[in-house]
Amino acid sequence: MGVTLVVASQLPVLIVLLVLGTVAKLSTVRSGGEPGALSRLGPAVLVPGRLQAPALVACAVGELALAAGLLASTAAIFRWATVMFFALSTYVLLELRRRRPDAGCGCFGDVSAAPVGVRSISRTVALTGMAVLTVWAEVPGWVTFVQPSWWTAAGVALLLLLSPELEELADRVRYRAPCEQRRAPAESVTMARLRGSRSWRAHEELLASAEPYDTWRELCWRFFAFRSKDDGDVVFAVYLSGRRPVVRVAVVSPEDTGSLPSYTPVSA
């Protein structure tokens, strides 16, 4: 019985996460959020505009079905479907990070609006592992709610560590406004965060000067444009929310005459 409870110990974590994801997504669709908010959230960001709200609703319904199945049943179909859901979520987040580095994962609706980073991806990997572990559980999820274990607490602690949404919620409680409507940190503070990032260290040798020739803000991002030694431009984008903000960088050569290329997905 002890081994059974150990392999089933993460069922409460998975069920609660799936229910929270369902509620948050449906709340975001119902409220509508800020104009264009859905276009910055996965998985809506990967589909045409008219399908963004239905995509979030479909994802929410799927999560709720998985949570109900894990709670009340030991059927393998629900266990393996949960594994596939989190494995697919990991793939989607990797694609978002590559194709739309400005977009949030949307895991918990508009609370997950921060750009996809290592923590969000690591969380879905951890959830996939937890789901795999529960495949061999011989009890339904409700039993583990009645008989919780220290393994369950360990799973909760890990997910809290890997959840950037906690910082966003803290900021919302403090400022009570979306990121794009908040007062930005002083430019010198944002510059200090940029210079402490891996993106800066990786591209510092390309810069002709340590000071930007232009800087501006767009929504939740502060941009810094530098001249490069080959007469091109190096543009850094620093996310304005969180204690360890995401930093993106685009290198533009003199031959580039079109729009800036996609930002290289490098975190601070």
Image: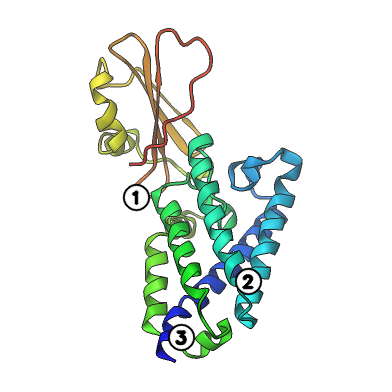
Which one is in front in this view, the residue at disc 1 or the one at disc 3?
3
Q: Secondary structure at mark 3?
A: helix
| Coloring scheme used | rainbow
Instruction: From the image, tell me which residue sits under label 3.
Output: 4
Q: Residue at x 27, y 30 (%)?
A: 202
- Sequence order check: which comes first, mark 1 or mark 3? 3
| Residue wearing tag 2 | 78
Question: Under tag 2, what secondary structure?
Answer: helix
Residues marked 1 and 3 touching at CB (< 8 Å): no
State the mark number for residue 243: 1
Describe the element under mark 1 as helix, strand or loop.
loop
| Residue 65 coordinates in the image, percent (x, y) | 68, 69
* Mark found first going from the N terminus, 3 or 2: 3
The residue at 70%/50% (across/down) is 55
Which label's residue is closer to the chain start, 2 or 1?
A: 2
Q: Is residue 82 left or right of residue 245?
A: right
- Residue at image coords 28%, 37%: 198
Alpha carbon separation for disc pair 1 and 3:
40 Å
For disc 1, the neighbor class at 10 Å (few under 14, some 14 to 19, many from 20) is few
User: How many angstroms separate mark 2 from mark 1 (CA)?
Assistant: 38 Å
Rate crowding at label 2 as few (under 14), some (14 to 19) or many (20 or more) other CA atoms within 10 Å. some
Judge whether residue 188 can be spotted in this image.
Answer: no
**Residue 60's x, y, as percent?**
67, 61
* Whole-percent x, y for residue 63 in the image: 64, 65
Specify the quadrant of the image occupied by residue 159. Answer: bottom left
- Residue 178, compared with residue 151, is above or below; it is above
